[in-house]
Amino acid sequence: MTIIPENNNEMPKYFFKYRSLQGKCLDRTIDILKKNRLYLPKREQLNDLIEGCRMVEVENNHSMGDGINMALKWHCKGPSNALDSYHVLSLSDNPFSQQMWAYYADSAQGICIAFRAIKELSILQRIQYVEDFSFDSITDNEHSDIPLNHMYEYAKEALMKKHIEWQHEREWRFLTQENEDYFPLSSDSIFGIILGANISESNRDRILQIAEDKHFRVYYLWAAPVLGSYLVLNKFPTFDGAELDVYDGFDVFLS
């Protein structure tokens, strides 16, 4: 396995969650903002189709077709059950990702929520990105011999590694086996909201009202083709000559 080194392993000051405001996603996003909680999905609800794949290779000497059986988890229930026992909280430390604004925030029609990396969120750990996976081979006959707590540890390790193609997400995770659907946040965990450049007027007004009621800071994403990058502004641009504070780095959240 080749692990891609990170430039900085220190805990960031802020975490971020990109959110769509389309359909049911709007209600779920409002739930985060109003109720101070984050949904904890299971593995099958994540968008990486090979989450934890390094746990599911099975050595065997069976007949042709076992590769299909393995893919369908028909004779690999031990590792799969261990992986599926976890709920996953995922946040990013990068609010400027063009890719994530595109596919998590619905082509910048959504928002990005900024959280302070304090208190309950200080337990998140950085994902390791790898170029290839080294499988923990577990034979069918070995399943009953592996202590359950060891199987869970293997699963946890597998869920903290992703392929290098996901590296741009700069993801941090918290894994739990508690039978809870939501991760509770303290009342001061949400710092602010970045409104997408393509957010609709109705959604913008709705989010702004929540931000005012909850005393969240509000920023605006702006695409700058001349610079080839996204910027964050302190207020919506009106092109009337008014001065704007423009940020292209994390100092936006320190101002």
Image (cartoon, rainbow, N blue to C red):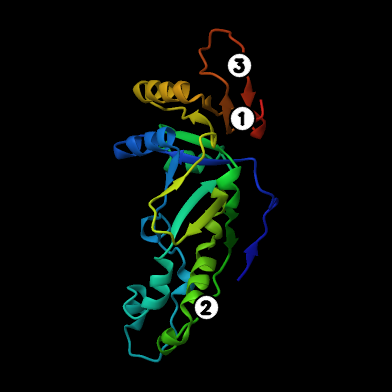
Judge by depth and name the residue closer to the eye, 123 or 154. 123
For mark 3, does the 10 Å Cα neighbourhood hold few (<14), some (14 to 19), or many (20 or more) residues?
A: few
Mark 2: which secondary structure?
loop
Among the 4 quarters of the image, the one containing residue 50: bottom left
Looking at the picture, how far across and down is residue 148, in whole percent?
46, 77
* 126 with respect to 47 (left or right): right
Amino acid at the residue labelled 2: Asp
In the rendered view, does 18 fall on the left or right side of 253? Answer: left
Instruction: Report the residue at 44% width, 42% height from top.
Output: 37
> Could you tell me how far apart the alpha carbons at marks 1 and 3 are, in whole angstroms?
17 Å
Q: Nearer the viewer, mark 1 or mark 3?
A: 3
Determine which residue is flagged by label 1: 227
Other residues around mark 1 within 10 Å, as few (<14) / some (14–19) / many (≥20): few
Tell which of 147 and 59 is nearer to you.
147
Q: Earlier in the sequence, mark 3 or mark 2?
A: 2
Q: Residues within 10 Å of mark 2 (few under 14, many from 20)?
A: some
Which quarter of the rendering shows the N terminus? bottom right
Q: Amino acid at mark 3?
A: Leu
Query: For this rendering, which residue is in front, 174 or 26?
Result: 174
Where is mark 3, residue-wise? 244
Where does residue 211 sit, x and y in percent of width and height? Answer: 46, 25
Q: Is residue 124 above or below residue 232?
A: below
Residue at image location 55% in from the left, 47% down from the top:
120
Residue identifier under label 2: 136
